Amino acid sequence: MARTKDFDEAEVLNKAVNIFWLKGYNGTSMQDLVDGLGISRSSLYDTYGDKHTLFLKALESYQCANSGNFCQITNSDRPAKEIIRTLLEYVIANLLNDKSQKGCFMVNAEVEVALHDKQVSEMIQKNDQQIEDAFFTVIKRGQEKGEIAGHQDARALARFMFNTIKGVQVTAKSTNERAVFDDIINLAVSVLG
C-alpha cells in the first residue's frame, strides 16, 4: 500500500522556487533542499526523484504563476499602449519589491543552466515565446485600432518589448533605483508611436 504524503506539494514547490531562485541551481545542494523544504530526504526523492526534476517542477510552477497575471493584463480592453505600460510596470514592481534583488527566476535559469540543459532551454524558449506572443497580440490590436503607429512591424515591436523586460530583469539584480526603470518604461512606450 502506498504511503500518503504528509506535506503540501504546492507549498514545497513554492519553497523550492525560493531556494533555487536565491542560490541558483548549481549553488543549491540536496541538503539545502532538505533543510529548506522541511521534508525528509526520502520524501524528496520519492516525490521528485532528484534535484533536476524538482528544479524543472519549480520552474514550471513559477512560470504558471506569472503567466496567469501576464495574461490577465494583456486580455484587458484598455488601450494597447496602456496595457504595455501596465505590463512593464507589473514586471518592474515585482523586481523592485524584492529586497534580495534576485531578478527573474526564469532569466536566472536561462543564464545559469539553459545552455547545458535541453529541458530547461525548451521550457524557457516556450515561456519566452508566450510572452512575445502576448506583446504581439496587444501591439497588433493597437495598430488595427490606430492606437499604435503601423509603420513598424508588430512582431519586431513585440520582440523589442520582450527584450526590454529581460533587460530590466537583469538590471534589477544590480540596482533598485526607480528612476532608472521609469526612464526605460517611458522610452519603450515611446517607440510605439
Image: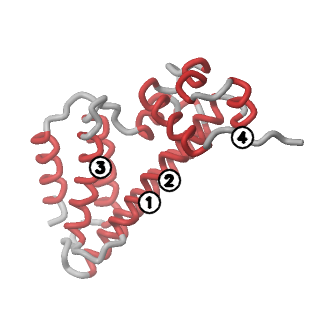
Mark 1 near mark 4, Cβ–Cβ under 8 Å? Answer: no
**Nearer the camera: disc 3 or disc 4:** 4
Q: Which residue is mark 4?
A: 5
Relative vertical location of residue 191 with respect to residue 121 in this rendering, above or below: below
105 above or below 128? above
Can you give x and y, in whole percent of width and height, for residue 52 in the image? 63, 31
Toward the right, the furthest residue is 1
Task: State yes or no: discs 3 and 4 in contact (Cβ < 8 Å).
Answer: no
Residue at mark 3: 91
**Which amino acid type is marked by label 2?**
Cys
Q: Look at label 3 and name its amino acid.
A: Val
Q: Residues within 10 Å of mark 1 (few under 14, many from 20)?
A: few
Most foreground residue, 150 or 123: 123
Label number found at residue 68: 1
Q: Residue at x 24, y 81 (%)?
A: 145
- Secondary structure, mark 1, is helix
Amino acid residing under circle 1: Gly
Residue picked out by circle 2: 64
Q: CA distance from mark 1 to mark 4?
A: 28 Å
Name of the residue lying farthest toward the front: 6
74 lies above or below 120? below
The residue carrying pointer 2 sits among few (fewer than 14), some (14 to 19) or many (20 or more) residues within 10 Å by Cα, namely few
